[in-house]
Image (cartoon, rainbow, N blue to C red):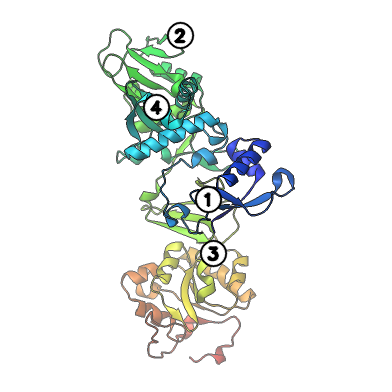
Amino acid sequence: MATVWVGQERLTELTGYTKNKITQAITSLNQNLYIQLVSHRKKRGEFGTNEYILCNPKNGEPFAATKDVIRGNGLPYFTFPACLATEHTAIWSLAKMTGSHLKLYIALLWLANRARSNEFNCTAVELRRVSRLARPTFAKSLETLQERGLVCITGEKPYSVHLCDPYTGEPIHEETGIDEDSPANYYVTTEDGRSRRFNANTGNAEQIEQLIRASLPDGEEPIVQRNGDLKILCPFHPDRNPSCSVSPRKQGCFHCFGCETSGCLSTLIMQLRQAPKSEAIQQIAGARGAKIEYRQPDKNAVAIYSYQNENRKLLKQVLRYPNKSFLQRQPAREGGWIWDVSDLPPMLYNMDLLEIAHTVCITEGEKDAATVTEPHLQGRYGLIIGMTSGGAESWDNQLAKHLHGKRVILMPDADAAGAKFAESVKASLEAERIKYRVVTFDDVGAKDVSEFMENHTAEDLLNRISPDWVEMPDGQYLEEGRVSPELLVSADVPMEDITI
């Protein structure tokens, strides 16, 4: 069954509800067959953790526990931005919404799903009907959602609706082929040293107004209207009388009553400053008092290596880019990524495969570890896998403790850093009395196992390790060969006990 464990403190944090409101909501969900309470709420105050079973409200039957509860149970669905729940301190978060705001926002998401687009047209009558809000409440809620940068609306009959990226308060970015143009690729470092996606949508209208004023041509002053909006000369067409209305309280959305051009703050800044999107993002960040850093998107990475523990829980990822640069990140509790792993202990790549492995090849770097694992070579009692702690200086002596009961093959790089790495690993293996062999590739002109495999086969790799330790993927051993003494080292077995 699909179950959720969550404490009242966490629910309060994510929803902004009081203790009594949460109790009422859980009771209502239970009565309407959305959930089942496994037990009565624990009497440990707000720090208690409770178990809830997710159910199909049509019949009250529990959902099956699958990796994807929605698709796994064949449910119709529409998307809801996860960041509204995880970024619970943001002005646009779920925790900051009233019930009316949430009803209207869900109605907008549902209509977008029906239109299969983040941009669609609808009438006020239809939107009130779907959201089930009275006219005054509807008007106020729609204004609030625009002020919080969750939706941008132009026109009235019908409304032209654009769903916005909560982090920017602007319509969702359309890919231009230039990665620096995407706001999703910019991060800030928090006070505790962690990196998070830059949130440009803070609700500070004064900062937006100051940026617009600073972007106007020298000598031009905006006309301040009664509602706080600004009127400026439109930069999109020759304009003698200010006809472009800009709303700082609505994240800088603008509309020109002369040329009918509408858009968002970054588009306006690009036009006023004649600058690319990346510079507009930098200008907005500066106005917000934020120092941002650009990070390449995942699609640019040559490979992404996931470090998991024995239970397949993701601990961190290493991203390798074409220029041999690397970035590391760990999953954030609230979703997304923390681009800092300095608080994590030393760990081994492919730890999730260690239980089924018989022989482990310790390499310098994740690429080499993956190269060793991919041929699916077999030891006499299990798989042969590549493992690594990362770069040349990443090895920690405590990591050897995980390798008890395994045969270890050390494959260092053929350089000074590799030699130093090998000495560190060997010392820790010998301290734990773990049998190992050292295999190098410099005699055939290869720096490491990955270079070796570019011009050699799995059979060549097996012969280099020696057939008495490994077999081919089809389960067959090569003809018994003799192990070269210079490739053999043993910490706990005398040399005379091994056939040479």
Q: Residue at x 41, y 77 (%)?
A: 377
Between disc 3 and disc 4, the foreground one is 4
Provide residue 388's location: percent of width, then percent of height. 50, 65
Estimate the spatial distance between the alpha carbons at disc 2 and disc 3, rounded to whole Å. 62 Å
**Which kind of residue does numbered mark 3 sit on?**
Leu
Q: Which residue is mark 2?
A: 226
Between disc 3 and disc 1, the foreground one is 1
Estimate the spatial distance between the alpha carbons at disc 4 and disc 2, rounded to whole Å. 21 Å
Q: Is residue 264 visible?
A: no
Q: Which residue is mark 1?
A: 331
Label 1 environment density (alpha carbons within 10 Å; few <14, some 14–19, many ≥20)? some
Of residues 443 and 260, which is closer to you in this image?
260
Q: Which residue is mark 4?
A: 152
**Marked residue nearer the N-terminal end (2 or 3):** 2
**Which kind of residue does numbered mark 4 sit on?**
Cys
Of residues 91 and 433, which is closer to you in this image?
91
Of residues 258 and 266, which is closer to you in this image?
258
Provide residue 325's location: percent of width, then percent of height. 42, 52
Q: Report whether 54 appears left or right of 265.
A: right
The N terminus - image quarter: bottom right
**Marked residue nearer the N-terminal end (3 or 1):** 1
Of residues 481 and 172, which is closer to you in this image?
172
Label 1 SS? strand
**Which kind of residue does numbered mark 2 sit on?**
Arg
Estimate the spatial distance between the alpha carbons at disc 3 and disc 4, rounded to whole Å. 47 Å
Label 2 SS? loop
Between disc 1 and disc 2, the foreground one is 2
Q: Is residue 492 visible?
A: yes
Q: Which residue is mark 3?
A: 348
